[in-house]
Amino acid sequence: MVLGTSSGAGKSLMTAAVCRVLLRQGETPLPFKGQNMSLNAWVDADGGEMAYSQALQAWAAGLEPAVAMNPVLLKPQGDSTSEVIHLGRSVGVCRAEHYYRDWFRPGWAAIRQGLGDLQARHPNGRLVLEGAGSPVEVNLQARDLTNLRLAQFLRARCLLVADIERGGVFAQIVGTLALLRPVERPLIRGILINRFRGRRELFDEGRSWLERHTGLPVLGVMPWLDELFPPEDSLDLLERKPGKPDAELEIAVLRLPSISNFSDLDPLEAEPSVRLRWVRPGEALGSPDAVVIPGSKQTLRDLGAINASCLATDLRRHLASGGHLFGLCGGLQMLGQRLVDPHGLEGGGDHAGLALLPLVTRYGHEKATRRVCAPALWPPGSSLALEGFELHRGQSECQEPDQCRPIAEREGLGWWRAEENGAVVAGTYLHGVFDSGPWRRRWLNQLRRRRGLPPLGEQPPHHGQQREALLDRLAEAFETHVNLAPLLKPE
């Protein structure tokens, strides 16, 4: 089990690294996080919802993501409430102050079922568990579903990860160990220092001090990795710095208050010729080549944030200058004329959209969660597939078919329209649409033509292949800097 001294210590990537290292050693690692809180989600092959970080760990383990790997998912939706997902299905909404009272027992049952399903599917596998936040939040320990309760239940050998970049690494580690109960302390078998900058020998004295004062081995010191890996929480976007000063295209992405599935943009981040610039409501849009409105957990609230700032005006000015605008899922809904919420799922009411596409969206209780692959009708050119997954409440309908056209042969996946000045407004319900290299490049080549730039080749690999290469590099760094052997020895 990989535990952390705090949220953001690097547990998710270190768990992915362990999975890939074990896979390379011929084992069948089984990633598992009993409970996760995240708006970055994935849909498995059966249409179940799970955290993207566990999907990433599944790929690291050479497995198809499955909801059994993340049986409890909490999706914050503001006002101290979260949607509760058990084994891939929405089962209700909870308030923070009532969560442990109302959802502890059902959550533990879902975790037990997820474990059973995963181990039954892979009877010879080795569980690689990820904790959540800190394992010693003293006000929550008695009802903690996914850290030491799970470690004790499974007799897991635990690696404690601390982020030296945040400062105070000695206090992080010693304080965490001091707050463990006597029955829990023997579970911790080693310490990992994460995100170290500079020469490792500069930390030799600190390493020796930790081993003397804790009685635990420091199993490794992981260096700061320059590669951009998918973050688990949208807060990590704050740490993204503008890069690639020589990029030929700039794409502005609206950093919405309730942004979800921001990993949709990772394939664009990986394009050498593209620079992404994240724009918050209240910040100037500038003059990008295109604007992307990403997914949202609270579409009406985020639409209100756009309208209350200068962004709505800036988007119209962008289109008046011949720009391109693309909406993903909730971003697509915002582009429409009206968003109707008769059941109060998003706060209720009948709301005006940005009126840039002639769409009306109506929210219902049914949630669309499915994988999709359909022939693309846009951007125009030779036949390509549009692929990804749907994860949304609300269905959109085009009210004026002569004013916008479908982007795929399958009905309801998205629409587009072009203006005489060259402006394009388009959107799709498909998350992961940019993962397809040929489709992504065709979309980028529209922007390049407008700038008079030569087209890019339209046969790059699927983003999944780039992700595989990153995971291999992560595993190689882990193997170089961390001694995993003490955690693999049987009792």
Image: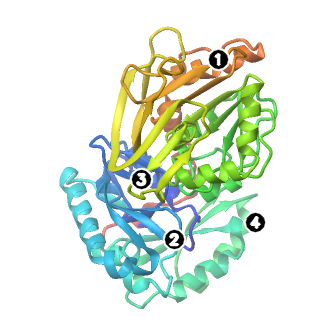
Considering the numbered disc 3 on the image, is that residue within a helix, a strand or a loop? Answer: helix
| Amino acid identity at mark 4 | Leu
Q: Is residue 113 left or right of residue 287?
A: left
What residue sits right under mark 1 in the picture? 445
Label count reads 4
Q: Earlier in the sequence, mark 1 or mark 3?
A: 3
Q: Earlier in the sequence, mark 1 or mark 4?
A: 4
Give percent across and percent down for residue 459.
Answer: 53, 16
Which residue appears at 45% of the width and 36% of the height?
429
**Cα–Cα span, label 1 and label 4:** 48 Å
Asked if residue 154 shows in the view, the reply is yes
In the picture, the quarter occupied by the C terminus is bottom left
Residue 277's tag is none
Give percent across and percent down for residue 259.
Answer: 57, 51
Q: Residue furthest bottom?
A: 182
Q: Earlier in the sequence, mark 2 or mark 1?
A: 2
**Cα–Cα span, label 2 and label 3:** 15 Å
What residue sits right under mark 3 in the picture? 54
Q: Are marks 1 and 3 in contact (CB under 8 Å)?
A: no
Q: Give above or below for 460 relative to 221.
A: above
Give percent across and percent down for residue 71.
Answer: 32, 60
**Cα–Cα span, label 4 and label 3:** 34 Å
What residue sits right under mark 4 in the picture? 202
| Amino acid identity at mark 3 | Gln
| Amino acid identity at mark 1 | Asn
In the picture, the quarter occupied by the N terminus is bottom left
Q: Residues within 10 Å of mark 3 (few under 14, many from 20)?
A: many
Q: Is residue 414 left or right of residue 47?
A: right
